[in-house]
Image (cartoon, coloured by chain):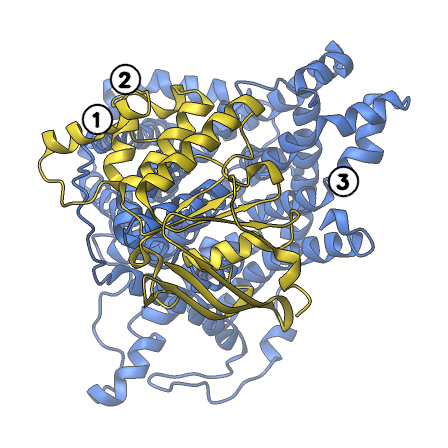
Chain colours: A yellow, B blue
Amino acid sequence: MLEIKSLCIKQSKQALIGGLNAQIAQGEVLTLMGASGSGKSTVLHWMIGALDPIFSATGELILNGKRVDQIPTEQRRIGILFQDDLLFAHLSVGQNLAFALPNEVKGQSLRRQVIEAQLAQIGLIGFYDRDPATLSGGQRARVSVLRTLLAQPQALLLDEPFGKLDAVLREQFRAFVFERVTALAIPTLLVTHDIADIPPQGRVLQIEDFQHA
Amino acid sequence: MRIGLPLIVARGASKGSTLLAIGLICIVFLPVIPGLVRMGFDFFQISHWFAIWQDTQTIPALMATLSSTLISGVLALALSLSIAIEKYPSNAWHSIVKRLPSLLAMPHAAFAIGFAFLFAPAGWLARAIAPLMAWDSPPDWLTVQDPYGMSLGIALAIKESFFLLWVMMNLLGERHIAQQITVARSLGYQRQQIWRSIILPQILPRMMWPFAAVLAYSLSVVDMALILGPTTPPTFAVLVWQWLSDPDPQRQAQGGVAALILLLVLLTLGGVLRGVAWVYQRATVDLDGLRQPNRFSMLSWLYQFGVLISFSLMILLFVWSLAQSWFFPALWPDELSIKAWLNADFTPFKTSLWLGLATSLIALVMVLIWLEWGPQRNNAWLYAPLVLPVIPLSAAQYFALLVLHLDGTVMGLIWSHLLWVVPYVLLSLVGAYRQFDPRLMLTAQALGYPRWQACLYMKWPLLMRPILGAFALGFAVSIAQYVPTLFAGAGRFSTVTTEAIALSSGGNRRTMAIQAVLLMLLPMLAFALAAIASHWQAKHRRGLR
């Protein structure tokens, strides 16, 4: 379970967000809605541990009973997906995924096997050695999701991950992401300004409700 | 819909204005070629090679040059990389980057003089430890002017690390890099490993040319070498410069050949660099998923130490310029006074001022015309003077000036500076210029303005901040020129740079410090004025900030 306890974010004494509380159960996708520039991405940056130094924040982030907002990003075990796929341009598709794969999977050939199996599952058979730049937008988006999930995060943050895709692709990709998240049963926070992004029967928080506290 | 740049070029660029743009740039570049060709002919005459080989100074001079160049290049890269790895991204990074402009604006010659004030046997450092060691006269140190060019190399490394860090700052400013770091951290990796496996492979290839510029500069630097480099024999660049300035035509030809040798050394170093880069890029990335901890980094401390040295020597220059009498081992002058300033010679200052203003203004006009009407592609050759050694280019310029009887004239002097000022102005302006929204230009032209009017009333005023910045940079580059000023000016013009270096061989530290302070202040004033002017323009226009 992922829990935000009384989060307040200030920008030079001016309160941006006040009294934000939220609980996200295993396998649940909670949506945080708000117009662009409303500060919803700032909440996300706080959760991942990359808050811009011009802001200051108080509050607690608790993941599976452990407080994580004071520890560095790399120890939080929270995955993040941005609007851009952010594949590393100097690595092949497979190497991008190998970067995420935990060290517990040992041996070069086994690591490659695991990644190739995963690629096959998302319909990208034989893409291990491909240059990410030669992939279509939809393919890159899927590789990016796979990279995030391969690291076995215990929670997931989605920062408008569907924003840059066209309508048809968007529909497919949304279904793809939600299906994977449900399968992994981890708490997920989705940040968006688009009502269509909200998963079926999903809970929704409006960022505006926390801005006049 | 975004309208592409080519459409607008097709609309507005007439053949005549394109020819004007190319013609202006050719005035700067083309006359250099005959001199280079002539040196090329001398290059194949075995007698010159024999004379160079016979000179006992050649080999030790080459050694000193190689060691100072390698120390400078490798150490500058190591210092700047280690501080970036250690601090980017963080709050501390912002304060480190904030200090860069004043460190970059410091001219090399003034830096060298300050460095000597700090580290020479009678320098401030020796004075600071003198009570501990019970010295009453300066120690027998070889801290500057050592025969291997090590102090020269270290001073260059500190100065160039700021330049490389500035290049890195621009590359790191791209948004996707910061996000990639966040992604990699969320995957469980720590700072140093992220840099090794994700950031360096992306930014190092793009730092090749700036690094080549550092090597070229270190290889052919004369002003700093005269102060910090070995004396008998000097560094190879200084030796070549002495030969070229010799009245004997035989010696001059020998100097021309040696200048080309300098170029060959640079090309060799460039080849080695390419080889290293090739191996680096093919080195297999070992992605075993092992998350490694950070290690302690000593070099990033050394970078901070370099910053400390740089600011200390700036202050030291000021203090020396005000020192009435300051004998070893006193830490502070007996008396401070502005008397020396009242009697100071301001002629070099005035010369530098008009020369810098004229050169950067002409360069700015040329560059603006080039950017607007010149060819949009294949412009890389314009940056050649920045990655080539100064000496052969300057000697070739001098040859052209002699033929045209323009040596020692104001026109010749300004022209000689343009070869370095134009590329720097172009480099600093090209990014902002190419990013300018072409739809704005289209709007102005649709309203009935011809292209040059649209530039004059809309585009250039909108680009005033980068234009003023480029102008200030051009001014700073002109101020710092040493070898071209001496060659093209035929010794008739004395600028703050040439004067400060000339005084360094004499005994009066106070007058030298005054010229060095003036040298240091000129570019800082230019950058400050540019900043104030663009701030003033943007006072009531938020969109310009």
Tell me how many marks there are.
3
Coordinates of residue B3 in the picture (x, y in percent): 70, 20
Residue under numbered circle 1? A117
Q: Nearer the viewer, residue A9 or B135?
A: A9
Q: Looking at the picture, do discs 3 and 1 lie on one chain?
A: no
* Structural distance between the alpha carbons of marks 3 and 1: 54 Å
The residue at which mark 3 appears reads as: B462
Q: In this rendering, would B91 be left or right of B471?
A: left
For label 1, the crowd category at 10 Å Cα-Cα, with few meaning under 14, some 14 to 19 and many 20 or more, is some
Q: Nearer the viewer, mark 2 or mark 3?
A: 3
Left or right position of A103 against A40? left
Q: Earlier in the sequence, mark 2 or mark 3?
A: 2
- Residue behind mark 2: B45
Q: Quadrant of residue B522?
A: bottom right
Q: Residue at x 65, y 51 (%)?
A: A37
Q: At x 27% / y 17%, what residue is drawn?
A: B45
Q: CA distance from mark 1 to mark 2?
A: 67 Å
Q: Position of residue B538 (x, y in %)?
A: 77, 52
Mark 2 is surrounded, within 10 Å at the Cα level, by few (under 14), some (14 to 19) or many (20 or more) other residues, namely few
Label 1 SS: helix
Q: Residues within 10 Å of mark 3 (few under 14, many from 20)?
A: some
Front-most of residues B8 and A50: A50
